[in-house]
């Protein structure tokens, strides 16, 4: 039902309102409304196309247009809720209002095109997309039926097909097949299509699925190496293809709609050199030692493992002949003077040794390949995981210390895998040699094993003591490295303050404590080595004494026993060495455990935010950095409308930056909820949510690279034209023109070659290049002069995005739709600039300090 009284229009249920006068504007007094473009034919509206949704207090221009063919076009307005009310503002449809409305609707800068033509073009584009979606939907139904038939047929077939996710895009199909074969989880096709606004690419599928992916350049004969799973572009049409490892130096080539075939040299030459390598990620959950072991097991090459175990058993069986031949040599051939047989046995032993040497070479290569593959996958996975961890994780560690922990995880896995593999192989050998040893002399065997176990146990206990010092040494090493890293970063400040001597003292104090602990650790290591040397001598004396007292053992049996026992004692030593290594690795695991146990931001079943309008709500939010400290917020509630320009001011420490961290998901509220477009932030994929944000933080930094690379850091596919647009918008065009290399001018991480204002404008350009729906600025224009700041603010206003700005300068917040004044974690005042100044409260006090 539609009611109209004077300039007030009430809309209820399925009623609609048509804008007739092009010079009018409308304010949404209550509720929300959907705004459609419709063709006007024979006094009736035609097919609708949604342009945008207007929130309460939003002002939008009317639309009444006649195109070149004489067609009439209007706005059709309907209530988004049960009730809505509009106020007609006669004659207020101005050019700036129309431009702002186009920006809010996501329509490009109009340029020379008129307001009416742009809306008609958007209507026609929307219809093409909607019709295309209907066609795709019908085709998908046909594909689903076809795949269902194939699935039923494959149930009765001996050759099972690789299951594929529901999706028709070739890039996704091939990525799904590659991930299935490599046992890597991939996101559902529906999630991929919902996130990818443009063409689906390998990088997008990998990003949304939280799979590490890197662009590489393929070298000659790359198909003969084991480089892991690779996505390539194949043939002249550059169609996507997947290269999946299937053994050492062998690949399968998978193409959309075709069966996988072995990758030959001829096929490899048709692949574009630029490709993407896919890595195996850690699970998106908190990981235990068991989960880490399961991950490493999934990285193993079963073929290499089978080769290692097979060669170990074969070497052990051949080695069993050595004690037997030694017994025959000393009991029969040497006493009888059969030198010909002695020579033959020597030749036979030599042949066995050569064979064992060759077996050892092959086994060592397979072991090296196995260990390298595990370490390669783990190191890539941990680098990827670090960037997936929440912001509050990094608050607990220094940069250098955290870098050490990351590196230690890779070495930890390598040490454990090598230890377990060596232990397993030694135990296999010990089983064979132990049986043979007992056949020579049970008495000698029991005594030898008892003595060996005793000394090994003493060495193990000493190692437990060493472990305490080892943990302390690692902690002090991380602390001293962090201090050195901080001092090197702040070398200019140190020299300016003239505190070089104090700096050296602070570093040496930590370093000398580390050296003191290392000295104690070295003493225990020397004691352990001394015990090991003494045990060998004591053992030999004891064994020879028992053998001399035994009348039943012959010289040949004793020599054969010694040969077998040497292998068994080596296995026992390996067992205790493994236990010792396990104890020594415990401090390392405790250091890296936090990286594994912390749940990544992408963990769990998170929903996609979809297209945001810019509405933000905080519902009774409370937050504290630590349970032992007073809360920053106790009960904070706030509503920000789409397109609203909100400024946040207050004294230092009042909670402004903490509020921004909560809105960005860097910190999690202890109670209460934060909503974006009525969607709970805790249930959303934070990485995808942040794709809708443009953020400039107070301590934002550039990367070492060109200005172009810095601006396109958040939009790698942005073209030069788009970069030039944002450079012009932020007032940086003239500065860049004066630079000899223009956009390719190199800047350093600490911006020694450009001014603070230029740095801030580059950061702002980086934030807006993706046309985000929501902008968060924390003192983002503090280094800009008033003229440049006004130019930047005008460009941001034309975008129509929701803006949340933290600032102290009056010129930054004077034009805000609403200013929030914070004090001790509460919003104590609220209103626009004029209202707050008239109140004479805290804002008036803060502003008066800047007014001369």
Image: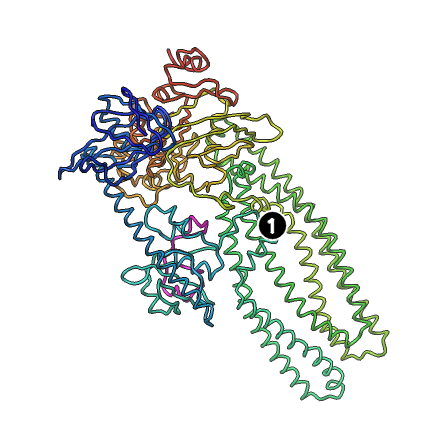
379 and 151: which is toward the camera: 151
Q: What percent of the width, then of the height, locates residue 698? A: 43, 29
Q: Position of residue 637 (x, y in %)?
A: 49, 26
Task: Look at the image and tell me in which quarter the N terminus lies.
Answer: top left
Q: Position of residue 348 (x, y in %)?
A: 63, 82
Q: Secondary structure at mark 1?
A: loop
Left or right, 807 with reference to 38? right
Asked whether residue 755 appears in the rendered view, the answer is no
Q: Which residues are magenta?
A: 206-230
Residue nearest the observer in this picture, 711 or 405: 711
Looking at this view, name the residue that lies furthest to the front.
Answer: 1
- Residue at which label 1 appears: 288
Residue 531 falls inside the magenta stretch: no
Q: Does residue 531 appear to the left or right of 796 in the view shown?
A: right
Q: How many marks?
A: 1
Badge 1: residue crowd in 10 Å (few <14, some 14–19, many ≥20):
few
| Quadrant holding the C terminus | top left
Q: Is residue 219 magenta?
A: yes
């Amino acid at each position: 039902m539609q009611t109209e009284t004077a300039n007030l229009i009430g809309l209820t249920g399925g009623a609609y309102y048509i804008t007739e006068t092009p010079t009018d504007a409308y304010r949404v007094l209550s509720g929300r409304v959907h705004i459609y473009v419709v063709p006007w034919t024979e006094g009736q509206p035609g097919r609708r196309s949604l342009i945008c949704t207007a929130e309460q207090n939003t002002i939008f221009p009317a639309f009444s247009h006649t195109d070149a063919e004489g067609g009439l076009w209007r706005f059709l307005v309907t209530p988004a809720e049960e009730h809505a009310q509009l106020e007609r503002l006669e004659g207020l449809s101005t050019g700036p209002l129309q431009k702002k409305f186009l920006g809010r609707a996501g329509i490009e800068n109009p340029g020379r095109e008129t307001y009416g033509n742009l809306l008609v073009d958007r209507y026609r584009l929307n219809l093409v997309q909607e019709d295309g979606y209907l066609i795709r939907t019908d085709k998908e139904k046909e594909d689903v039926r076809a795949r269902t038939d194939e699935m039923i047929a494959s149930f009765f077939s001996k050759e099972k097909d690789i299951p594929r996710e529901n999706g028709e895009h070739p890039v996704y199909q091939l990525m799904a097949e590659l991930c299935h074969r490599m046992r890597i989880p991939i996101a559902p096709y529906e999630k991929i299509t919902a996130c990818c606004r443009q063409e689906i690419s390998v990088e997008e599928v990998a990003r949304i699925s939280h799979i590490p992916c890197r662009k590489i350049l393929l070298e000659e004969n790359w198909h003969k190496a084991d480089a892991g799973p690779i996505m390539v572009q194949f043939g002249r049409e550059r169609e996507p293809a997947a290269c999946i490892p299937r053994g050492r130096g062998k690949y399968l080539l998978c193409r959309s709609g075709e069966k996988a075939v072995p990758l030959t040299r001829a096929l490899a030459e048709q692949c574009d050199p630029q490709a993407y390598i896919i890595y195996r990620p850690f699970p998106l959950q908190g990981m235990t030692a068991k989960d880490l072991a399961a991950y490493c097991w999934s990285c193993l090459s079963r073929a290499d493992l089978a080769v290692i175990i097979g060669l170990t058993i074969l070497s052990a069986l051949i080695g069993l002949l050595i004690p037997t031949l030694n017994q025959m040599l000393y009991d029969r051939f040497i006493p009888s003077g059969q030198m010909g047989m002695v020579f033959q046995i020597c030749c036979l032993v030599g042949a066995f040794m050569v064979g064992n040497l060759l077996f050892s070479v092959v086994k060592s290569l397979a072991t090296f390949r196995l260990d390298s593959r595990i370490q390669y996958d783990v190191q890539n996975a941990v680098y990827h995981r670090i960037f997936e961890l929440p912001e509050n994780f990094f608050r607990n560690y220094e940069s250098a210390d955290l870098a050490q922990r990351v590196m230690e995880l890779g070495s930890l896995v390598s040490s454990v895998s090598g230890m377990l593999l060596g232990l397993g192989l030694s135990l296999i050998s010990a089983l064979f040699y132990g049986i043979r040893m007992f056949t020579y002399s049970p008495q000698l065997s029991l005594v030898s094993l008892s003595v060996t176990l005793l000394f090994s146990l003493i060495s193990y206990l000493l190692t437990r003591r060493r472990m305490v010092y080892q943990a302390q040494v690692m902690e002090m090493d991380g602390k001293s490295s962090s201090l050195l890293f901080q001092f090197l970063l702040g070398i200019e400040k140190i020299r300016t303050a003239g505190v070089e001597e104090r700096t050296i003292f602070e570093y040496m104090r930590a370093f000398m404590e580390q050296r003191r602990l290392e000295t104690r650790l070295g003493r225990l290591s020397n004691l352990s080595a001394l015990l090991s040397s003494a045990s060998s001598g004591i053992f030999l004396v004891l064994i020879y004494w028992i053998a001399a007292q035994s009348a039943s053992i012959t010289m040949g049996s004793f020599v054969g026993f010694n040969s077998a026992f040497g292998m068994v004692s080596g296995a026992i030593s390996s067992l205790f060495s493994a236990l010792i290594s396990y104890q020594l690795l415990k401090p390392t695991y405790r250091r890296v455990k936090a990286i594994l146990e912390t749940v990544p931001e992408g963990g769990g079943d998170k929903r996609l935010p979809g297209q945001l309008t810019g509405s933000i709500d905080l519902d009774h939010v409370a937050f504290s950095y630590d349970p032992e400290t007073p809360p920053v917020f106790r009960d904070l509630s706030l509503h920000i409308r789409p397109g609203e320009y909100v400024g946040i001011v207050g004294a230092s420490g009042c909670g402004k930056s903490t509020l921004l961290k909560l809105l960005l998901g860097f910190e999690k509220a202890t109670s209460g909820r934060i909503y974006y477009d009525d969607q709970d932030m805790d249930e959303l994929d934070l990485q995808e949510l942040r794709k809708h944000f443009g953020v400039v933080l107070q301590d934002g930094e550039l990367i070492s690279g060109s200005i172009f690379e810095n601006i396109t850091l958040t939009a790698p596919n942005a073209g030069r034209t788009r970069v030039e647009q944002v450079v012009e918008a932020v007032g940086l065009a003239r500065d860049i023109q004066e630079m000899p290399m223009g956009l390719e001018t190199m800047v350093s991480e600490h911006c020694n070659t450009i001014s603070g204002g230029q740095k801030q404008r580059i950061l702002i350009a980086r934030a807006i290049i993706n046309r985000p729906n929501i902008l968060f600025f924390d003192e983002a224009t503090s280094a800009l002069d008033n003229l440049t700041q006004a130019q930047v603010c005008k460009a941001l206003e034309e975008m129509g995005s929701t803006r949340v700005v933290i600032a102290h300068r009056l010129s930054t917040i004077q034009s805000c739709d609403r200013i929030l004044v914070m004090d001790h974690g509460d919003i104590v005042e609220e209103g626009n600039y004029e209202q707050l100044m008239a109140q004479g409260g805290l804002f008036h006090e803060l502003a008066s300090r800047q007014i001369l």
